[in-house]
């Protein structure tokens, strides 16, 4: 059973300097906490979210069915990150569209909605904003920073920007920077959004429209990269839509309402097409287009080794935390090779590193799923952190 989660927010009047040279003030960070902070304030775990996630990491909202947090299988009482032992903090990043100040909010100086004028934000900016929120919560040192994908990049950045404020970094399905192929996927998705006639240069709010067509395509592109070829073949194969209709099937991979969607879209021939369009439609209803542009750019920009001539070993010399890195064999978006680059750089610096490469079929999405070896690895590592606190 999941527990009841309560969203909170914290307002910051003071300027937050950004990596771009700009700054932002009078902003809000949305967050949630789970568990109890111990008397020593030493059992806090910060969870950093990936592209389209939020501060709602675990638990459910009272009276709202199907409102589980995005990592509810990982975090909670008796789960691998056990909230009976840890005080877990989830923060929604600046520029997001789930409660923290972002492009949909009003600029304090102009009184107009930010839109395309929201400042560029980076992974490093998010980490500094998270540190300010932890200051307000009275947490000076974290037991661990945990994140998957883009969240893993934030965990890595924490070890470099605030090395004395954390004891462990858990980096899952992540990388020290994006490959050119990954940047290319992000750019194609962004072009789908900015060329949508309803985008209006990022100021579509003034026109009362949303660039849903662009958002749909962006999500479809992204979703393809999150799944492995094996999983796609297993779930969908080359099954034709008319075969699904003839069988009266409602495939388990298409959420409720998916079957009616199959009937209504006459130009769809393959089941995979139906699935992708469903995902695209759903995404376009809740995600902000400017937020998508901001966050994918932050992904592209992240590259701590760039300040050291591309030498990751030199870049990670500042890190003092103990590390757990996890990768998945079929994740071609953030391949095991990228995690091994981080492992090597840390070992070069004689840091304490544990590394698990999980042979899972699910592609990049594996970090959100229930593979027993993955869950056992996480549980074992956080058990060891808990023993340090005892």
Image (tube, grey):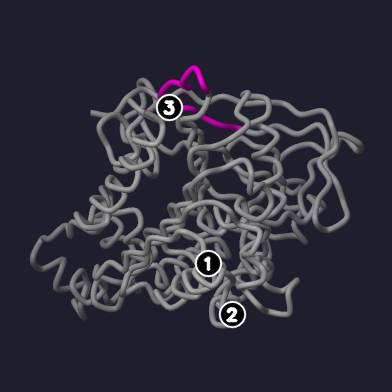
Give 155 or 316, whichever is nearer the viewer.
316
Counting residues from the start of the chain, the first of labels 3 and 2 encountered is 3
Image coordinates of residue 157 in percent, x first then y, are: 62, 56
Secondary structure, mark 2, is helix
Image-quadrant location for residue 122: bottom right
Image-quadrant location for residue 300: bottom right
Image-quadrant location for residue 325: bottom left
Seen at 41% across and 31% down, the residue is 389
Queried whether the magenta region covers residue 113, the answer comes back as no
198 up-or-down from 62: above or below? below
- Residues drawn in magenta: 30-40
> Which of the two marks, 3 or 1, is nearer to us in this view?
1
> Which of the two marks, 1 or 2, is nearer to us in this view?
1
30 up-or-down from 385: above or below? above
Residue at mark 3: 34
- Distance between mark 1 and mark 2 Cα atoms: 28 Å
Give 52 or 36, whichever is nearer the viewer.
36
Secondary structure, mark 1, is helix
* 44 lies left or right of 69: right
Seen at 57% across and 57% down, the residue is 156
- The single residue placed furthest to the left in the displayed view is 247
159 up-or-down from 44: above or below? below
Residue at mark 2: 184
Mark 1, other Cα within 10 Å: few <14 / some 14–19 / many ≥20:
many
Image coordinates of residue 313 in percent, x first then y, are: 61, 73
Residue at mark 1: 346
- Distance between mark 3 and mark 2 Cα atoms: 37 Å
């Amino acid at each position: 059973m999941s527990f009841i989660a309560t969203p909170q927010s914290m307002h910051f009047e003071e300027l937050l300097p950004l990596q771009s040279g700009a700054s932002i003030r009078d902003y809000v960070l949305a967050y949630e906490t789970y568990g109890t902070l111990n008397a020593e304030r030493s059992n806090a775990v910060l969870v950093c979210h990936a592209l389209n996630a939020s501060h709602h990491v675990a638990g459910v909202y009272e009276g709202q069915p199907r409102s589980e947090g995005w990592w509810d299988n990982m975090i909670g009482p008796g789960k691998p990150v056990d909230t009976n032992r840890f005080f877990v903090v989830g923060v929604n990043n600046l520029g997001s569209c789930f409660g923290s100040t972002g492009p949909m909010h009003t600029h304090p100086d102009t009184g107009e909605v930010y839109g395309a004028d929201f400042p560029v934000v980076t992974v490093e900016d998010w980490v500094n904003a998270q540190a300010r929120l932890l200051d307000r919560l009275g947490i000076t040192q974290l037991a661990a920073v945990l994140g998957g994908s883009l969240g893993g990049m934030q965990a890595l950045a924490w070890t470099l920007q605030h090395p004395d404020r954390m004891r462990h970094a858990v980096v899952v399905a992540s990388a020290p920077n994006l490959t050119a192929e990954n940047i290319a996927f992000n750019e194609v998705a962004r072009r789908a959004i900015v060329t949508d006639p309803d985008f209006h240069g990022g100021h579509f709010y003034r026109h009362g429209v949303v660039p849903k067509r662009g958002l749909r395509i962006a999500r479809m592109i992204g979703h393809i990269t999150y799944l492995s070829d094996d999983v796609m073949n297993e779930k969908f194969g080359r099954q034709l839509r008319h075969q699904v209709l003839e069988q009266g099937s409602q495939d388990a991979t298409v959420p409720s309402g998916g079957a009616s969607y199959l009937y209504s879209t006459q130009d769809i021939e393959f089941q995979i097409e139906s699935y992708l369009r469903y995902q695209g439609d759903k995404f376009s209803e809740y995600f902000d287009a400017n937020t998508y542009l901001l966050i994918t750019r932050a992904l592209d920009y992240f590259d701590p080794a760039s300040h050291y001539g591309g030498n990751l070993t030199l870049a990670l010399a500042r890190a003092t935390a103990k590390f757990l890195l996890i990768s998945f064999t079929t994740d071609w978006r953030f391949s095991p090779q990228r995690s091994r680059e981080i492992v090597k750089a840390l070992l070069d610096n004689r840091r304490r590193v544990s590394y698990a490469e999980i042979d899972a079929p699910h592609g990049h999405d594996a970090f959100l799923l229930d593979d027993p070896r993955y869950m056992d690895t996480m549980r074992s590592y956080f058990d060891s952190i808990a023993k340090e606190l005892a």
